[in-house]
Image: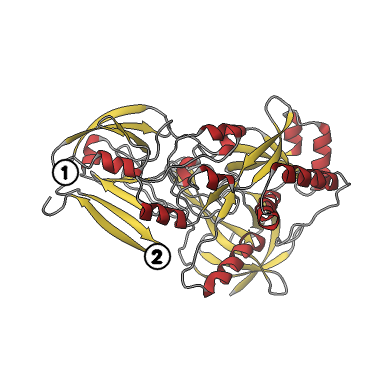
Amino acid sequence: MQRASVVTNANAALTIPSAEVPRFRAVHEEVIRLDHDFGASFSGVLTDDAGRVRALWGSYAEQVDKEEREWCAGLPTHVFAPWVEKLAALDTTPVLATPPVRTLDAELEAVLLSKAAQFGLPGAWVSRLDALDPERRQVLRVRSCVADSPAAALLSGGDMILQIDGRPVTCFGDVDAAIQRACEAPAAGGGCGEGEAEEAASAEAGAAAAPPAKRRRGGGQGQGQQPTKQRQGRRRGKRQGDDEDAKGEGQGERQGSGGMGGGMGGLEANGVQEGGSSKRPPEQQQGTAPVIKGGAGQQQQQQQQDEQGGQRQGGVEAARQLPEVMLTVFDKSRAVRDVRVRLQEECGMGTSRLVHWAGAQLQAPHRAVRELGFLPPGGGGVYISRWHHGSPAHRYGLYALHAILEVNGRPTPDLDAFLAAVEGLGDGDFARVCLCHLETTQRKVLSVRVDLRYFPTWELRLDLGTATWRRTLISGGQGH
């Protein structure tokens, strides 16, 4: 089946707020709006008159006043086509590896130039960005940053991103292209040194100073209103992204899904990621990537975590291999300044390790949690994402959206440290648990009585070689 429609907006910027329970959501996307509302019961593609696929007709979800709302829009082909090509190239390999994604770790939003001028953006920049992109007439503004990221140490909410590496940016696609160029530079030149980056930025700034011509965005529906056809099919019920969290504080479990598209800051990262330790190293204050320590010296576990990309790159040497970008920003002090931000790496595999203890599901903070912008100092590596009814976690208040900081006075910066802290607890023993709520930032101490008979301690790990989960009983159960 097909149906003709007209494009009303080919560059509608999405702004989906964070849900009550952290989960994947579509950010840094420009979608296609049509004059007909086909509703959420249709799926398919948007094609032009020649039958060429111009966009996917996908569903998006957002939470408004604690209620789930779903709507549909077109995702342009230029967003997902590069990833389809990468995955197709890997189809001949025995094990399908997920391509790594470099991210800026800052969520951006589009602001009209007229509004930016009211905030004090210099007229020269307003004129330059307007001439560069007369269709959008907008500037990108920092909305938030990922917790404990290099971007969080250098950028603040409200900063306007004017150019990257000497090239002005006006839309998410420009940032995508800038990150891609920065990632390709080390492969071509063998590194991303300070001198090379400055020379490249100078050359790009000279090229950008020339009078810019009106640009056309590839992969979209073009400008103005153009007829399209929608091939309608039976709804598959596939909504992008799975909610990994459960609503705490006495409410039942909650499941949801985000929209289609890229992760925050990376502009391309799909899915959530299991983060590592949340300790902030001194190097981060200078814009370098944080040093993330792995487990308790278990080489096999560390190798698996490095292969699947569930944690940030461990060690200073690995962090230094990540490229940097030079951002020209207009900050709240109404000054234009340059900051060098090191990119980070994400992986679409998502969470690869879960620990169940006392009826609570524990994991490292995935990306949606870190997008909240806060992790407790010296902790936060053990995040409660779910709890089970009738369990000790339910009875004693070990709810979701909390990070476990200490157990019986022993710090728990990661899952390995947590397992070591609870290793000696027997059935019926009490554990003193120090928690921090990730929204209110308030701390509290609870006493939890362990029930190893009905709620044993066990672990789930994702085996990338076979793409299967493996369950390992740690303590409790039969014969505890």
In front: label 1 or label 2: 2
The answer to whether 318 is drawn above or below residue 433 in the figure is below
Three-letter amino acid code of the residue under disc 1: Asp
Residue for badge 2: 467
Splitting the image into 4 quarters, where does residue 220 fall?
bottom right
Mark 1 vs mark 2, CA separation in Å? 32 Å
**In this view of the protein, which residue sits in the foreground, 278 or 453?**
278
Q: Position of residue 277 (x, y in %)?
A: 42, 40
Q: Residues within 10 Å of mark 2 (few under 14, many from 20)?
A: few
Residue for badge 1: 451
Q: Residues within 10 Å of mark 1 (few under 14, many from 20)?
A: many
For this orientation, the residue located farthest to the top is 333
**In this view of the protein, which residue sits in the foreground, 112 or 311?**
311
The answer to whether 476 is drawn above or below residue 148 in the figure is below
Q: Residue at x 21, y 44 (%)?
A: 391
The answer to whether 52 is drawn above or below residue 286 in the figure is below
Q: Residue at x 41, y 62 (%)?
A: 464
**In this view of the protein, which residue sits in the foreground, 32 or 149?**
149
Q: Residue at x 75, y 28 (%)?
A: 120
Three-letter amino acid code of the residue under disc 2: Ala
